[in-house]
Amino acid sequence: MIVKNSRLARILKVNGIVLYPFIFLAPADPDPVLLNHELIHWAQIRRHGVIRFYYLYLKEYVAMRGQGMKHDDAYRGISFEREAYENAHNLAYLTSSAPSSRT
């Protein structure tokens, strides 16, 4: 379920966040690229399973922070974020590729 104009997203100071099975978006009329970015995360969760996805996501983030990386660098370094950012502008990514074969 997609929640637009989300108070939660605004409180967390993010444009979007997936707390499966919900996608919370701060804008009332989100940009298609933002929506695609979050849908890629939704697909990643479906691919890996809820617990495994969030475990791996946090594990990567904590490991990078432990290596001294700043928040933004660690966040951008997470493999799931890299996939989402690299493909967010390709609005056909989830239908034209084979994301099930990716990390």
Image (cartoon, rainbow, N blue to C red):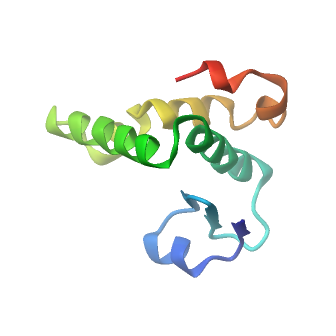
The residue at the point 46 percent across, 77 percent down is 11
Residue 24 on image: x %, y %: 62, 67
The answer to whether 1 appears left or right of 68 in the picture is right
Q: Is residue 36 above or below residue 87?
A: below
In the rendered image, which quarter is residue 23 located in? bottom right
Residue 74 on image: x %, y %: 32, 38
Q: Quadrant of the N terminus?
A: bottom right
Q: Is residue 55 above or below residue 19?
A: above
Front residue of 57/21: it is: 21
The residue at the point 39 percent across, 41 percent down is 57
The answer to whether 15 appears left or right of 92 in the picture is left
In the image, farthest residue toward the bottom: 7
The residue at the point 72 percent across, 53 percent down is 35
Front residue of 96/51: it is: 51
The answer to whether 34 appears left or right of 48 in the picture is right
Q: How many marks?
A: 0
Q: Is residue 102 above or below residue 82?
A: above
The residue at the point 79 percent across, 68 percent down is 29
Residue 46 on image: x %, y %: 61, 42
Residue 77 on image: x %, y %: 39, 32
